[in-house]
Amino acid sequence: MKRFRRHGQESQRDRLKQELFQFSKTVEHGFPHQPSALGFSPSLQLLAIGTRSGAIKLYGAPGVEFMGLHEENAAVTQVHFLPHQVELVTLLDDNSLHMWTLRAHKGLSELLEIGRFTLTGPPGAPPSVTRVTAVLAHSSGELLLLGTEGGHVFVVEVPGFRELEERNISLDQVSSSVPDDYIGRRNLEHVEALQENPVNPNQVVIGYGRGLMVIWDLETQRAVQHIPATQQLESVWWTEDGSHILSSHSDGSYCRWSVGGEDSKDEEEKSDIPYGHFPCKAISKIVQLPTANGPPFLVFSGGMPRASYGDRHCISVIHSKTHVALDFTSRIIDFFVECPSPSAHCDPSALVVLVEEELVVIDLQTEGWPVIQTPYLVPLHSSAITCSHHVSSIPLKLWERVIAAGELQLTHYSKKPWPITGGQNLAPDPPQRDLLLTGHEDGTVRFWDASGVCLYPMYKLSTAGVFHTDTDPNDNMNQGTEGEWPPFRKVGCFDPYSDDPRLGIQKIHLCKYSGYLIVAGTAGQILVLELNDEEAEQTVEAKVVDLLQGQEGFRWKGHTRLDVREEPVLFPPGFQPFALVQCQPPAVVTALTLHSEWKLVAFGTSHGFGLYDYQQKNNVFVKCTLNPSDQLAMEGPLSRVKSIKKSLRQSFRRIRRSRVSNSFPLQEANARLEAELAEMELAPVQRKIEARSSDDSFTGLVRTLYFADTFLSDSSHNTPSLWAGTNGGSVFAYMLRLPPVEHRTDEPITAHPAKEIQLMHRAPVVGIVVLDGHGAPLPEPLEVAHDLSRSPDMQGSHHLLVVSEEQFKVFTLPKVSAKMKLKLTAIDGSRVRRVGVAWFGSSRSEDYGESGLVVLTNQGDVHVVSLPSVKMQVQYPCIRREDVSGIASCVFTKHGQGFYLISPSEFERFSLSTRCLVEPRCLVELPAHSASPTQHRPQPDGATSAHRYTHFTVISHINSKYS
Amino acid sequence: MNKNHRVPSNRSLSAVEVKSKFGAEFRRFSLDRSKPGRFDEFYGLLQHVHRIPNVELLVGYADVHGDLLPINNDDNYHKAISTASPLLRLFLQRKEEADHLAFGTDSLTRKKNTVLSAVLLRPDPNRKKPPVIISLPKDFRPVSSIIDVDILPETHRRVRLYKHGQEKPLGFYIRDGSSVRVTPQGLEKVPGIFISRMVPGGLAESTGLLAVNDEVLEVNGIEVAGKSLDQVTDMMIANSHNLIITVKPANQRNNIVRSGGGGGGAASGSSGRSSDSGASYYGYSSPGGIGAAASTPSHIIQNFHPEELESDEDDEDLVIEAGGEAELIPCAPSASYSMPSLPRYEPHLNLRTAAAASTSSISINANGTLPTSASSGSLGNITSTTPSPDRAMERRSLEEDGTVITL
C-alpha cells in the first residue's frame, strides 16, 4: 500500500517535471563560422549564407532567420535562389546540388530540403565533365543551367532536377563556331560564368575560363555572338539594358563589350586595369548598376597591385568621380548590391559584402557611403570573447540609458534602416529585457540585447583608456594621406589582434538596479564603473592590493601590472570607471562579485581574495589562500600550452604588422605549430589515479565568491557575510560589520573570519548559495528594495549549499553540519563545470514555479538539480564533450536558458524551461506582384562563384611568393 | 583463578563480570553486555579503576580457548564482551614493557596455562625472539582486501583499497584498450579500461592484488562500460578514500578454483574482516539518491554494510569556527564509523591539542596528519602580515609565470 502511494507521488513528480523542464536548442546568434557562399533573393528580400561545415542560413528582416544543415559534411560553395520562388539551390563541395524550400506550416515557415541531385556524365567520361563550376538559376524559375569543368553546360528542370539532355550546350557545339583566329580555341577550359540577358531570357552568356564568352540562344540552340577576350576570365556581368557585357580577368583588368545584333562586329569598347602599371591581382567579380539619372555604379572586388597591396581584401566602388577601395580585415567571400525595389529605375541602395569574419553593409545613398549597423550576424569575435555574463529582466530605466550611451557611439554609422526586409517576424515581443555582456581580449565589454532572436549590439565599453598601453589608439583608423592611391578606406570591425593581452576581460558583474558594473581582467585589474549620461574627465584612483600577505620566497614570473594613467582621462557617456584595484601579483582574476547595496566588491585570484569598499575606496581585508608547498606547476603542461599560444599570437602579430612587406612566412608558422601539436600527441593516453592532496597545484585558486545576509554566528541574528570557495575544496566565511547608513562614508567596514570548511573530497568549489527558510536562494542585492522579489524568509533556518566539481552538499547554518548531498562524480564520472540558480515556471499553471540549480558537466550534459533537496531532476546532452571551449563558454540565465559558443563567432542559445523560450517564428511569402516573371531585370542572384577564385588567388599568391 | 568468580550464571545474561589484572593488582567491575560502549571509553575506565591515568596500556583478554587476545578497537572489544562466559579476564601491561609476541593464534597448540603464565608470570629472558618486530597489534589496519568472492565470477576480483589519511599514494595508472567478449554472434572486440602502470611503492602495487593489464570492470559498484577514460579517472579519484574496483585480472592463474556450488552458499571464510563477506547486501549504492535519476545502468551488486557507505570519509568535512576549534562534521543522521577507527581518531585529537596550543595560527592538514609547516588553511588574524617563522623556513622558493587559466 505504501509502495503504491509512493509510486503515485513519483508519477505526479514526473508530470510536474514535464511541465517545468524541456530542453531545446533554439537559435544561433552571431556570425556563421567559416562562411563559404552568399546568395540573395531580391524578390523575397532574403539573404542566404552557406558555410564550410554544410550549414545554410537565411536572414531577412530582423528576427526572420532560418537554418538548415546538409547531411553531407561538405562545404557549401554556391547558393542561388530561384528567381521569384521560395526555393533555393545549393552546390556543395562534393558536386551535389540541393533544393531547399521555405514551406509554410501552421502559419510559420520552415526551411526544408526537398531534393538532391548530382550530374551524371556519359559512361566513361572523366569526373571533370560533370564537375559543376557555374550555376545559373534561370529567370523562368524552371531551369537551372550548370556549367562544368569540362566546358559543357547542362540544363536541368527544377524543382524536380530533371535533366533536359536535348538542351545541353556541349563544348563541341560551341567550339565549332568559334572564330578561327581566336588563339585559345583548342582549349576553352571550364565554364567560369553563366549570365542571363536581363532583357531577353532566351539569351545567356557562357564565359569560359580561357577568356572566350559566347552568347547562346536557348530557343534556337545556337551561338549568337562570340566575345574573344584573351585573358583568363574571372567573372561576367550583363548590364541591365542588355547592351553591354562586362568581363573581369585574372590580370586585374576588366573589359566592356557591346552586345550587338548578329551581324555587328564584336567590339571591345573599353578595357581598363584600374590599379594598373604594375602587375595586378585578379578582379574576381564585377558588377555595374545604373542610377536613375547619372553615371552607373561600378563595383568590383580585387584587382590590387600584386606587389604592394596584393594581400589586401578590397572591394572598389566607383561612381562618377568618387572612387573608394573598401579595405576589409578578412577575406572577401562574395558581395551583392541591393536595390530598393526590383524595378531598374532607382539607385542602388546598399552594398552587402560577406567577408570571412563578418557581414558589412554599406549605404550607397548617403554621402560618404557609411556603414549600416547590422541588426544580426554581428561578429561576436571582433576581438576574441574571453568571458560572458548574462543579466535578466533589466529595469527600463537602465535599459534606456545603455541604449542612449550606445547610440552616441554610432555616429559614424548610417541612419538608413536595414535594407534586407524579407519575411515577417511573428515571434511575440520578448517578455523581459535581457542583457548579455561579453568580455573581450582587447579589454572591451560589449553589451548585447539578448531579449529576442537577434543578438543586437547595444553598447561597447573599452577599458583600455584607463591604462598606458603600447598601442597607438589611431593605429587602425588612420586613413592615409590625401591622394593616396588606391584610395583605401578601412571598413568592418573584425580586429582580433590584441596588442596587450593583459587588458583581456576575465570576469564581469553588473548590478541592474544601481547601474554599477565591475570588470576584472588578466593582469589582476578590477575596475568599478558607474553609468553616467554625461561625459566626464576624471582620474581613476588605483589601489594596489598585495594578496601574498608577506609570503616569502615567492617569485612572480608573469606579466607586470598595467600602468595606470595618472592624468585625468576623458570618458564618454556610458559606464565610466571611478575606482581601480590592482592585485599583486597581477594574476588573472578568477572570481568576482559585487554587492551594490553594501557597496562592496570581492575579488579573487590564484593567490587569495580581497574585499574592496568602493564607497570609501579602501580595501577592507585580504586573505592569502596560497599553499606554501604549492609548486604551482608552472613549468608543467600549462606553460607549454601557453608558450605555443604565445608564439602563435606573436606570429600573427608579426604577420599583421608586416602586411605590406610580407616578410613572415605563414607556412613556417603552420609547420612549427603542427610539429608541436604532433609532439604533444605522442604522449601515451593514460591517467594517473591519485587521491587529491593538499599539495596539489592551484589549491589556493579562488573559484567563487558570494555575498549573503544570513545566520553565521547564531540563529537569531543575521549578518552580512562573504563566502569564498577555492580550488582545493576550502570554503572561507567572513562576517562583515557595516556601519549604519549615516556613517557609511566615514566609519570603516570590518570583517572577521567566522568559518572555514575543508571539504574532505577536496574538489574545487565552483558555487556557493545560501538558501532561506523556505529553501529558496537568497535574492540579489537591491532586488527586494526594488520590490522585485519576495523578501527572504529570515525566520526559518538557513542552509548553505556548496557546489564542488564532484558533489552538491547542503549544510545547516549557523552550525555547519552536513545535511544532504548529491554525488555526481563518484556515480557517473562527470564533473561540474558551470552552475547557476534558475527559476522555472510551469507551463500549465501561471503561478507555479520552482528554483533549481542548472548544471553543465564536463561531459557536456546539462542537469537540473532541485532546491533545497538536491535531487537530480532532468539530464540532457547539450554540448559535445570534446568541445572544451564550448563548455567553458557556457553561461546560464536566471530563467533556465543558456548560451555557449559553438565557434569563436557564434553563440548557441538553449532553453531548459518550458516557459522561457526564445526562438525564431517567422513567415516568408512570395510577393504577389512578382509571382510571374516580368520584363525587368531579374537581378541574378548576387552571388556567383567569386569565392572559389578568391581562394585560388590566395593560394597562387602564396605559391608565387615562396616557390 | 577460574574458580574465584562468584557471579551467579543467571546474571551473566545482562552483565559481564570483569576481572582486570595490572601488575599484581586485580580490579573487579561489571559491564552491561548489551551496551558495552566504545573501546576508548572502556580504555579510560580501565585507567580509572586501576588509578593509572597516564599509563599507556596494552589490553589483552583470555578467550574461551584460553588464548590471550588483544583488545584495541571497538570490534575486538565487542567480541570480547560478547564471548565472555561469564567472566572476562583482562590482562593489562604497560606498553613499553609489553611482550606483544604473546598474542597469537598459534597459542591453540599450547596449553592455556602456559600461555597465560608466559605473559603474566614468567617474563623469560631466554625465550627465542623473532628476527623482526613487524608492528604492534594496535597498528594493524586493512590496506586492501578482496571482497565479494562468494558472489563474483571466478574470473573477476573485487579489490578494496583503504586510503585512510596515509601518505602512501594509491599509485596506478589506467588506459583505454579493447577486450574480447564472447557473444552469441561470436567473439567481439569491445573497448575497455585497463591498468597501465603501477607506481613503485604505491598502495596498489604493495597489495599485490592489482596488476598491469588487468581490465577494470566496475568502480565502487558502477560499471565502467560505455564511460570514457576521463570519466573513469574522475570516478576513481572521487572514490579514492574508499576505492573498490572490480577487475578481470590479466593473469588468471592465481584464481581460486571453486567447485560448482552456489556462489552465495559458500561459507564465508576466515578472512580478516568478516564484515566484508559476512552479509551480502544487494542494492543501490547511491547514498545521495542519484541512482534513480542518473541514466547509468544500475546493475550494482554491493556487499558492504550500509553504514559503511554512509560513513564515507568525505562526510567528515573539517569545520573551523572562529573561536579556533576544529571539528569534523559528523555525518548528520548516523555517526557510526565502522572502519577500524583508531588511526582516524588520532588526527582529530591531535588537532585539538594543536588548536589549543596556538591561537594565532592554526594549521590544519586535512589529511589527518599532524599539522606541519607545510599545511594549508590557516585561519588566523587576517591582518597579520608576519608569517610564522617555521613556515618561512621550510618554504621552498615558489615561482609563477602568470599563465592565464581559463576556468
Image (cartoon, coloured by chain):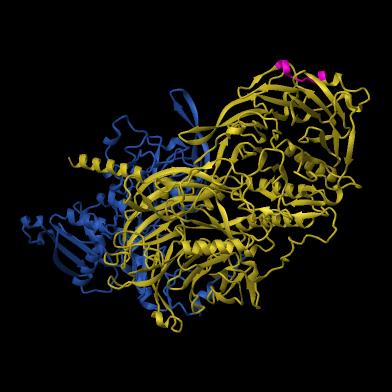
Magenta stretch: includes residue A291: no
* Left or right: B309 as drawn, with respect to A323: left
The answer to whether one can see residue A498 in this image is yes
Q: Residue at x 64, y 74 (%)?
A: A569
Locate residue B202, reporting x and y percent. 48, 53
Q: Which residues are magenta?
A: A165-173
* Left or right: A724 as drawn, with respect to A652: left
Chain whose colour in the figure is blue: B
Locate residue A137, reporting x and y percent. 68, 29
* Left or right: B112 as drawn, with respect to A32: left
The answer to whether one can see residue A627 in this image is no
Near-viewer residue (B297 or A502): A502
Q: Residue at x 63, y 62 (%)?
A: A409
Q: Tell me the chief SS of the magenta region.
A: helix
Indicate whether A201 appears above or below A256.
above
Q: Residue at x 44, y 58 (%)?
A: A393
- Drawn colour of chain A? yellow
Near-viewer residue (A170 or A542): A170
Say which quadrant the N terminus of chain A sits in.
top left
Locate residue B400, reporting x and y percent. 60, 66
Say which quadrant the C terminus of chain A sits in.
top right
* Left or right: B331 as drawn, with respect to A744: left
Indicate whether A912 appears above or below A44.
below
Locate residue A557, reporting x and y percent. 64, 67
Indicate whether B179 appears above or below A525.
above
